[in-house]
Amino acid sequence: MKIKSLLPATFTGLLPLLAASPAHAAWTLNLTPGVDQVSRDIYGLHMLVFWWCVGLAVVVFGAMIYSMVRFRHSRGAVPDTNLLHSTRVEVIWTTIPVLILISMAVPAARVLVETGDTDGSQLAIRVTGYQWRWTYEYVGTGVKFISSLDPRSNAAAQLGSDISPFSVPNYLLNVDHPLVVPAGVKVEVLVTGGDVIHSWWVPAFGIKKDAIPGFINEAWFDVDPDKIGTYRGQCAELCGRGHGFMPIVVKVVSKADFATWLKQQQALSKTETGIAALKATAAGPGPAPSIL
Ligand SMILES: [Cu+2]
């Protein structure tokens, strides 16, 4: 069989395979606007620059193609040498790109400043990346927990496991304890790392912040009140063997549901602390605490 006829056959063979794969993301060609103002502004900026690029491509390639066709040698075209060292032309083709760049830089700087403006946030969550899980601490509430890969994904991911990853819902994108946040509230996230550099990435919120040991990077989100639901993300900084096994799940709930949840967690953490204290007393004095 000739190579020419093999290629289409290979591609038509691959297409059904690709279509059948449940692992691929939804077929979209563009960014999605997300579920809060920051992500929408990032989307708007992306579209603005995209249309600038389309316009520039049309003008530049249009002029090139028109010139090549209209003034081709076979039609007797003679080079025009008047444009060489023309100050007027050089001023024009320097000024126009500078104006275009400024028109992109101004909205880009505005969005950049907005993403870092955590003023007026009503809830602060400290996010710490560890190899290979996240911890979430609701600052000032006493609620803190570890969010690890869900047991079903973990079981299917083991070498020699008989569990098909396709049978696990949200394989490698699910956790045991999701981050729970209220909708319609400005939430500040304080991102840091506990061992190596990670990155807390939740595309729907327009957040991708490096989690660096010794540093705290700030970000914020304020999910629209009508966008209650579950949003997923991943660690976006290669952090070691388990990098692909520390997903992020954020459950956005109503303010009332969040208040109830927070109370439950506070009660739970008190109980857990109580149990831990009882165990410690029963076991006698432990090793001296290390001083960091
Ligand atoms: Cu990581």
Image (tube, helix red, strand yellow):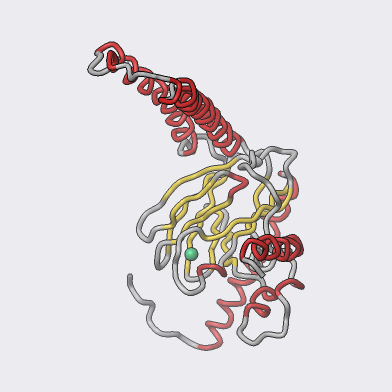
Answer with the quarter of the image where residue 232 lies: bottom right
Work out whether 13 lies above or below 229: below
How many numbered marks are there? Answer: 0
What residue do we see at 59% from left, 45% from top?
205
Residue located 38% across and 23% down the image = 97
Q: Left or right: where does residue 248 sit relative to residue 63?
A: right
Q: Can residue 168 be seen in this snapshot? A: yes
- Which quarter of the rendering shows the C terminus? bottom left
The location of residue 154, given as percent across then percent down, is 64, 76
Taking 12 as reference, is 275 above or below it? below
Quarter of the figure with residue 123: top right
Position of residue 136 in the picture relative to residue 287 (left or right): right
> Residue 147, how many percent across, how many down?
59, 66
Q: Is residue 24 above or below residue 58?
A: below
- Tell which of 43 and 83 is nearer to you: 83
The image quadrant that residue 18 belongs to is: bottom right
Left or right: 292 in relation to 169: left
The picture places residue 101, in percent across and down from the top left corner, at 39, 26
Question: Who's the residue at 46% across and 54% down the image?
Answer: 191
* Above-or-below relation of 165 to 182: below
Please report the residue visible at 67 percent of the width from the left and 63 percent of the height from the top: 5
